[in-house]
Amino acid sequence: MITDLTGAPGLARHAQGLRARDIEAFRRYWSRMRKAGDVPRRTDIDPRGIAPVLSEAFVAERIAPGLARLRIAGNHLNDLMGMEVRGMPLSSFLRPGDRDRLAECLADLFDRPATLDLDLVAERRMGSAPLTGRLVLMPLRSDLGDISRALGCLVTEGPCGHAPRRFAISRSRVTGIDTGASADPERPAPAPPVTRAPLMGERPYLRLVTQD
């Protein structure tokens, strides 16, 4: 099912043309990583598979209902904010008035689950030209098997201008995913008990590197 919330149709049509071929390849790669129709795991993602959008790509982690933070991010996202964005909420890229809308979309992404496709526009301001963008997110399972990660990319057209640049959502599409699985992720058969050290954090897996 697709939920379509339309804002400015002209801007939305323009945003849909941004790097359309690269974004479609990005989507196809995520689809190829699905096994038996299920959501891919974070460890299934190889940066070489998303090379065309590597500098715009990121992995986000759900930290609360409707809220996700960036665990790994490409250099383009740093340029948009004028700082290192790793660890920041994804909502930092949006104007305050659009963050509740993003939160609703993120709840769908992790809970249904669903994919997101948002058209964005940053208004003109002194020293900065108008900037349009497209934000695509697709769910991932964590190492524990829960859907609490997302693979995304944020592509823009136009010079970044003076950072930070924050966007309004001009249009959003939420597409539900049929995983063919129950609400609880499938777990392997119990193994013999072992003593484990406390889990201190995930090892970064997706490394985003740009070359001159």
Image (spheres, rainbow, N blue to C red):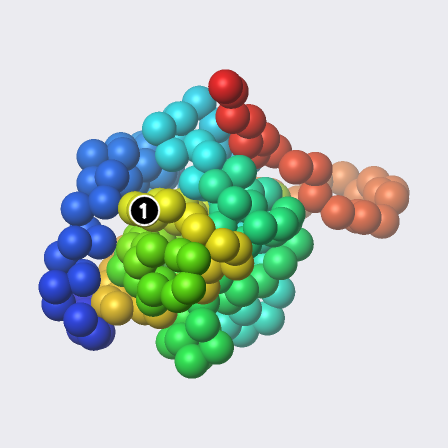
Secondary element under disc 1, as helix, strand or loop, is: loop
- Nearest the camera: 7 or 71? 7
Tell which of 142 and 161 is nearer to you. Answer: 161
- Circle count: 1
Specify the amino acid type for callout 1.
Answer: Gly
Residue at 38%, 34% (x, y): give it: 53
Q: Would you place residue 211 above or below residue 79 in this image? A: above
Question: Would residue 177 appear left or right of 190 to someone viewing this image?
Answer: left
Q: Which quarter of the image is occupied by the N terminus? A: bottom left
Which one is in front, 170 or 48?
170
- The foreground one among 69 and 178 is 69
In this rendering, would 78 be left or right of 204?
left
Name which residue lies at 31% across and 58% down: 130
- Which residue bears the numbered disc 1? 158
Percent x, y for residue 108? Answer: 38, 68
Which of the 4 quarters of the picture holds residue 100? bottom left
**For the residue carrying disc 1, how many other residues have a C-alpha within 10 Å: few (<14), some (14-19), or many (20+)?**
few
Q: Quadrant of residue 69?
A: bottom right
